[in-house]
Image (tube, rainbow, N blue to C red):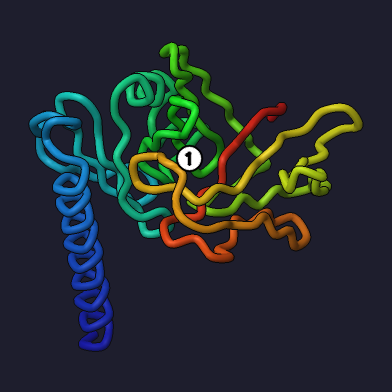
Amino acid sequence: MIQKRLVISVLVLMSIATFAAASEAIDAKYKEIGAATLGKPAGPEKSATGGGRVRLYAKGGIWSSKATGAHAVYGATYDKYKSLGAEKGKLGYPVTDVRGLPDGSEQTLFRHGLILVDKGGAVDAQVMSKATFTADSVTLKGMKVTKTPQNDAFVQVEPQTGATFSCDCLTGSGDTGTGNCDLRIRGEVVRCANVSCRNNCRLTYVKGAS
């Protein structure tokens, strides 16, 4: 009986520690992104699907999970994400913040897809059920992956469909960073690897079909 109580106590303490870590990550992300972008908190932090945590703000939200870390979604991307069920939907948790790209568009990667906002404000969400994203890689279950001469990764889904990813050295604001990154393919995993980038190597979806 005492042993069972000890096990239960340990599990409770682990849960408290997990929630505390998630709360700290959400608070840190809010400070990083800023109140001007996210707005004031719209309510308390709460539990989210799959054991994660979420806090909503006037202009967006921050989602945190053990597998994906804490990431902020806001603006047109946030509106689209909410309409698709947020973390409960097919996209799952975000694995990046909303990030600007050099062409003026914005891209946010999620566990199983992405949301694109072009420089004119048009929003496109793509669910890729066979893909599992991190911030710098995508694992494509059951898909053949090849490289194009331009060093983009072309993902062969069916004979005449696919998706193209590039690998860029970018600053936090989306400007081109100093140095280079390289797409490396091993089996079903496409990874954006650092060669000489002094900023962040970021996997970017270019075009294709899910």
What residue is drawn where x is 82% and y is 48%? 146
Residue 80 percent across, percent down from the top left: 40, 20
SS for dot 1: strand
148 left or right, relative to 32: right
**Residue at the front extreme?**
178
What residue is drawn where x is 38% and y is 25%? 77
**Residue at the bottom extreme?**
3
Q: Quadrant of residue 152?
A: top right
Picture layout, residue 206 above or below residue 54: above
Task: Give 110 or 4, whichever is nearer the viewer.
Answer: 110
What residue is drawn where x is 40% and y is 39%? 174
| Mark 1 closeness class: few <14, some 14–19, many ≥20 residues within 10 Å | many
Q: Quadrant of residue 204?
A: top right
Residue 119 percent across, percent down from the top left: 44, 18
190 left or right, relative to 102: right
Q: How many marks?
A: 1
74 left or right, relative to 105: left
Residue 163 percent across, percent down from the top left: 72, 34
Task: Give 88 or 134, whichever is nearer the viewer.
Answer: 134
Quadrant for the C terminus, please.
Answer: top right
Residue type pointed to by label 1: Phe
Find disc 1 in the rendering and name its residue.
110
Picture layout, residue 37 above or below residue 131: above
Quadrant for the N terminus, please.
Answer: bottom left
Task: Give 151 or 26, whichever is nearer the viewer.
Answer: 151
What residue is drawn where x is 45% and y is 21%? 117
Residue 54 percent across, percent down from the top left: 25, 42
Task: Give 39 or 151, whichever is nearer the viewer.
Answer: 151
Q: Quadrant of residue 40?
A: top left
Picture layout, residue 148 above or below residue 199: above
